[in-house]
Amino acid sequence: MSDDGARLYEDLLAGRVSRAELLRRGAAVGLGTPALAAILAACGGGGSAGSGSSAPGAVAEVGTAVTTPAPTGELDQLKWGLFYEPGPLDWIYDYNYEENTVVTNITESLMRLTPQLSIEPGLAESYSAPDDLTHVYTIRQGVTFHDGSPMTAADVVFSMKRHLNPNSYWAFAYFNVKSIEPTGSSEVTVRMKRPDVIFPALMATPAGGVGPQAYVTAKGKNYGTPTAGPVGTGPFKFTSWNQGANITLTRNDAYWDTAHAPKTKSVVFSFIPEESTMTTGLLSGEIDGAYHTPYSGLTQLRSSSVGTLYLGKSMLFTVIYISTTSGPLANINVRKALLKAIDRPALAKAVYSGAATPLPSTMTPLGQWSYAQSQAEAAFQKLPPPVLDLEGAKKLMQGVDTSGTIVIATRASFQRYINIASIVQDAGKKLGLNIQIKPINPNDYGDIFFSDSARKGIDMFISENYADVPEPLETLYVTVTPQPANALTYNYDDYNNPSVTSDLQKAVAESDPAKRASLIIAAQSVLADQPATLPLVSPAVPLFLNKRATGAPASFCYLYYPWARDVGAA
Amino acid sequence: MTEAVLAQTQRARRRAIGFPAARLGWVGMASAVVIVLLALMAVFAPLIAPMDPNSIDLLHPFAPASSQHLLGTDDTGRDIFSRLILGSRTSLLGPLLVVLLEVLVGVPIALAAAWRGGLVDGLISRVLDVLFAFPGILLAILVISLFGAGLKSAVVALAVAHMPYLARITRGAALRERRLPYVEALEVQGFSAFRISARHLVPNLLPLIVAQASVSFGYVMIDLAGLSFLGLGVQPPTADWGVMISAGQQALLGGHPQQSLYAGAMIVIAVCAFTLFGERLIDQDR
């Protein structure tokens, strides 16, 4: 691309030109129609926070970029920012942002999430499901681990069986698994107790991660820690972990996927927990890039001449989980009224610097739909629009007993959560509800999700949750249907609408995507009228790359896709 | 009691009653006026604040100063002026509670050490030495990590951290006072140690205690603001000057320094006023 073309491309991504202006100026600088189409495709419709303005009531998706311009050469070192120091880099314990951002470049999975947020074969050469209860994975041949040992079906079975241990953070994926057996030298078969369409999708996450049995067994509990780093088949090898400071990976020159050989010699991940420090580091060029950059700093990053801000296609959703079965929130009308009284478009603008799509009463943003997208989009538009309707909210509150205090938990020292809690408190006040904010120590906040005792005295709490895979059922099913003991659940208020439960139980067993989509959409429609949670917005994935580096995928795939292999010199 | 001894105790009491303006100087008086104004602002905050400090206006974040918002709005459209006024309550109440705890614990300990001497004095002095060895803010963070974040924990933690300073100074002054003839005369008359301390020693030491407490107030205010800034003290969204500095730090990069700037200015003004006032009191006592 010419310099003028590159500048034009950057202007489009930064929101400085419209798509129409791009076509006009593109022709003027000599870019042909294919080049312009490629630019628009890469942007997925414009990746800047400025995109998405629309008529009141309509929902325009913000953040649809999936890729960044391809690199032109090799990079010696990539300096990447993480907003906290990861825990152990053992795939069975990696179920959070920064752990997965790092480990996805080391330990690969049977399937893989793509930048377009679809699923393709990874370490499994192919996948088939002869019936609803059987999943067969043909293992790719000629793949070696970083320690030089070849990957075998035995390694795959060993790796999958590690999740049968309830200590695995991905144990929930195997809840319906009956057996995992090698059925050939390069074939592994998983048999299920009952049909579960979410299982094969989750094989694109660390639930399908593969490590060397001998090495992992030898290292025991130390595997994945700074003393015994992880070993996988990925494009980068673990090199060092300087606790409290950084993790360094180096290129795997024997990487099996030669068509996507890594273009960077080493990647240094620095831990930068403080938001303004992260923004300053990116603006000063001290860090080459970061995913999920602070939303509060997007205005500065957007106007920076140091690099480019991309707003990627996302599977994130900000939601308020209800965790009480009594008090005002047990009344469905109170939930609906609160949603109407929260100005979701204004929240998206003020709290997320415009880099979020207001959600119309659903927890399944369009980014989660890898199938039946037109069906999902049509259903999305029919949901009650996420507009402020204070009068409508007050009507719903007529005759409602507002006595008692509602406690909303928020992560202390986390300004975005604090601001959302303040907004909910203010909305409640307008409806006569007494909402108290309870700040929870950031280190203890995660306990709220998994411990009844941690939720004691808390009526609702804020979460920036995400779907791991582009399957809307993944988070929806465990949030709005009753779950058996020991299964993963986000259903904290014992929500059980017979129609929703019936539809979603059928959907989990439905292998036909179109039929599954219809069932989910039917449940979604009921949930819009009988909300189980308070869905607020779907934040885009902010990615900042300075002018040294390019090629990183822009979408939410970065948790389960070896993204660093695509980065090179700009 | 002899006339000389009586005069000694009465002179000391006169010293304790009132602080002549002329001896404070204009700096001391100006500081006193600022302190009174700040106290009035805190007491009457709900009446003075033009708007609800927690009222959100998402459509007008970072609004500039106007007749509606005298100092503009913050990132969620809250009125900064109203939050500054309401913020004076926790920002002043916290240090006040810390200083009260310092006095209630530190003065009796100091008097016990000065009166009993020997082993008791040695033991108390060594404990104070140990507490001195810990940086105040570090000790506070340690206590908060054990008992959880919040104003209560921060107040207790800072009271423990700052008490040794007041106790050490009070002990020194009490040792001098203990050796004066009037104390011996009172003991000869059969008055108990508690009565002599409560009725005579404390009133005579009061100017020094008040002066030291005033200086301490300033330091405590900075430490409390620091703890709130770190998310360990007053918890947002409560209006508090330390919290406001912390909440506004990201906006600083975005060219909206108002929230942090104004809250910081209030802390500077309050700390200067209390410190200068305290120093003038100490000068007067010499």
Image (cartoon, coloured by chain):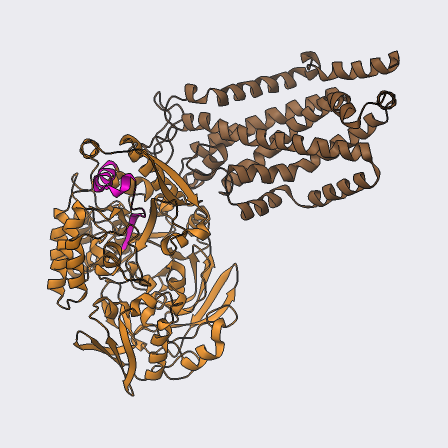
Chain colours: A orange, B brown
Residue plotted at (74% across, 33% down): B110
Image: A13 above or below B238: below
Where on the picture, by quarter, is residue B124? top right
* Residue B132 at x, y percent in the picture: 70, 42
* Residue A246 at x, y percent in the picture: 49, 61
Residue closer to the observer: A497 or A124: A497
Image: A497 above or below B68: below
- Please identify the quadrant where the N terminus of chain A is shown: bottom left
- Asked whether residue A197 is in view, the answer is yes
Left or right: where does residue B50 sit relative to residue B198? left
Residue closer to the observer: A84 or B200: B200
Magenta part of the protein: which range?
A: A316-341
- Please identify the quadrant where the C terminus of chain A is shown: bottom left
* Residue A120 at x, y percent in the picture: 23, 71
How many discs appear?
Answer: 0
Residue plotted at (18% across, 57% down): A501
Residue closer to the observer: A229 or B261: A229
Q: Outermost residue toward the bottom? A: A185
Residue plotted at (60% across, 27% down): B272
Residue plotted at (17% across, 38% down): A56
Q: Is residue A320 one of those drawn in magenta?
A: yes
Q: Is residue A383 one of those drawn in magenta?
A: no
